[in-house]
């Protein structure tokens, strides 16, 4: 048996990096005042048709939908914004207006699996409800950017754009429609189909045959209404002040129907064709269209697998993630004494302690220490026992020092005091 196509098992040591990233995500989101929300893995299919939009790739060809034994049409969530809005409304979280929520969980999309593209993947996302101003846009962009900054990832680019609102978008839509109509023959089949109802979506097309036509499309910039322009200027001002580098990219429009004004993506060249790590924007119309009040909102979704791939390729030090101590016994007497020591160490909260129980040479045990991502090794053979000592090796710097080893309990207490 094998895992279903497009899914993956996360096993050590990679699962350790997942845990570390998850811990940072929780800390970061909490630090920005966001509370975690967990929603079901499946929802009524109707939620995604309404909340994501009928003409999107997701709804048209990527959903895992099924009919349950009770005859309901359900869908494994392909994204979490619509479920979060549904849950926020159902639990009255939006009754006082502002609310800041984040999520971290699996999404399911029937896609052609390739590098950075899976059928089950994971997203970290935030949704900031209730604020119409560019300050909230700035906040969510900074939150996403800060995750990358704290990992010292380089080579990420922030692309921002505005797609206007109900006042200025109709005129832009007409201009785009006229332009694409004039180039209709060179467009992909998907794009021709979308031309009538949503020409903006064509800008987001990934079909290679569309690229040349898209490159010549008129930019929104010239047609923005005053309010949308002021909003965009304010956002740029906030980003500049915070020294978050960005590029204005008129081709970023996002594939989902509910976006208004600000849209953004964070891209990496480390990912090849799947270059987007994070995507988001403002969606002032979504809450109302899902039956809620007229409440503005802005958020993003970040692909956890893609973020980890970027991390892998960045110099962010792995040594820093080493922790704990590997006990290495050479000989049966040393083994028994180190098992005692291990027991005492494990009673102290906070110091990971590992040990292998086979008769293995030093080198083999050091390899196991690496697999455990241990920072230190504590080594004892007959010579060390005779000298009432242990060798403490720093596995990052490869430096040895000796520590007294007369009584296991005392030595354990000493080691804990050393705050390794
Ligand atoms: P793409 O253009 O790569 O198809 P998308 O526009 O469908 O992305 P969103 O729906 O905006 O993506 O999702 C936000 C982020 O979630 C993406 O930038 C990406 O990092 C991640 N993501 C989306 N779909 C997948 C997938 N099938 N496998 C892995 N990560 C994904
Ligand atoms: Mg997609």
Image (cartoon, helix red, strand yellow):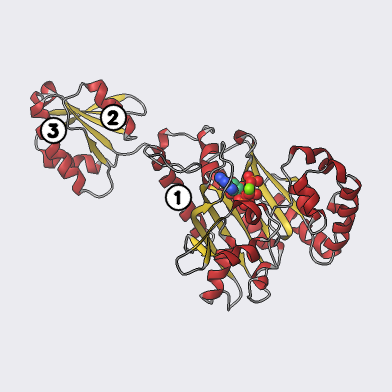
**Quadrant assignment for the N terminus:** top left
The residue that appears at 65% across and 77% down in the rendered structure is 293
Query: Residue tagged by mark 1?
Result: 22
Instruction: Locate residue 411: give its quadrant.
Output: top left
Mark toward the start of the polypeptide (2 vs 3): 2
The residue that appears at 74% across and 54% down in the rendered structure is 237
> Within 8 Å: ligand 1 and the Cβ of disc 1?
no
Q: Is residue 318 above or below residue 223?
A: above
Distance Cα–Cα, label 2 vs label 3? 23 Å
- Most foreground residue, 352 or 16: 16
Rendering coords of residue 234 (x, y %):
75, 58
The residue that appears at 12% across and 21% down in the rendered structure is 383
Distance Cα–Cα, label 1 vs label 3? 38 Å
Query: Residue tagged by mark 3?
Result: 405
Rendering coords of residue 318 (x, y %):
43, 34
- Residue 413 makes an appearance in the image: no
Distance Cα–Cα, label 1 vs label 2? 25 Å
Mark toward the start of the polypeptide (1 vs 3): 1
**Quadrant assignment for the C terminus:** top left
The crowd level at tag 1 (other Cα within 10 Å; few <14, some 14-19, many 20+) is some
Find residue 368 and name its label.
Answer: 2
Secondary element type, mark 2: helix
């Amino acid at each position: 048996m094998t895992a279903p196509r497009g899914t993956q098992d996360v096993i050590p040591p990679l699962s350790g990096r997942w845990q570390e990233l998850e811990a940072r995500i929780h800390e970061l989101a909490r630090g920005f005042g966001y509370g975690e929300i967990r929603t079901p893995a499946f929802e009524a299919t109707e939620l995604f048709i309404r909340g994501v939009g009928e003409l999107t790739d997701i709804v048209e060809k990527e959903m895992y939908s099924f009919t349950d034994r009770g005859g309901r049409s359900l869908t494994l969530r392909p994204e979490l914004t619509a479920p979060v809005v549904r849950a926020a409304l159902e639990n009255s979280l939006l009754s006082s207006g502002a609310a800041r929520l984040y999520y971290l969980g699996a999404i399911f999309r029937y896609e052609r699996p390739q590098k950075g593209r899976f059928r089950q993947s994971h997203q970290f996302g935030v949704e900031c409800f209730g604020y119409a101003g560019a300050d909230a846009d700035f906040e969510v962009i900074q939150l996403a950017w800060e995750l990358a900054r704290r990992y010292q990832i380089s080579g990420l680019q922030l692309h921002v754009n505005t797609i206007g609102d109900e006042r200025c978008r109709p005129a832009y839509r007409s201009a785009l429609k006229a332009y694409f109509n004039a180039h209709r023959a060179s467009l992909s089949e998907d794009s021709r189909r979308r031309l009538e109802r949503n020409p903006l979506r064509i800008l987001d097309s990934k079909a290679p045959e569309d690229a040349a036509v898209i490159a010549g499309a008129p930019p929104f910039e010239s047609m923005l209404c005053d309010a949308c322009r002021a909003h965009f200027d304010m956002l740029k001002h906030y980003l500049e002040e915070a020294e978050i580098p960005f590029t204005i990219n008129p081709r970023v429009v996002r594939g989902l129907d509910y976006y208004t004004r600000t849209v953004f993506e964070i891209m990496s060249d480390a990912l090849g064709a799947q270059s987007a790590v994070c995507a988001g924007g403002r969606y002032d119309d979504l809450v109302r269209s899902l039956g809620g009040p007229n409440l503005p909102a802005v958020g993003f979704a970040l692909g956890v697998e893609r973020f980890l791939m970027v991390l892998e390729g960045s110099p962010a030090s792995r040594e820093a993630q080493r922790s704990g101590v590997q006990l290495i016994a050479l000989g049966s007497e040393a083994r028994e004494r180190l098992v005692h020591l291990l027991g005492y160490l494990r009673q102290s909260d906070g110091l990971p302690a590992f040990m292998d129980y086979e008769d293995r040479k030093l080198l083999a045990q050091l390899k196991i220490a690496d697999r455990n991502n241990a920072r230190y090794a504590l080594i004892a053979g007959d010579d060390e026992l005779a000298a009432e000592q242990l060798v403490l090796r720093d596995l990052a710097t490869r430096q040895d020092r000796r520590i007294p080893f007369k009584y296991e309990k005392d030595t354990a207490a000493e080691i804990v005091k050393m705050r390794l």
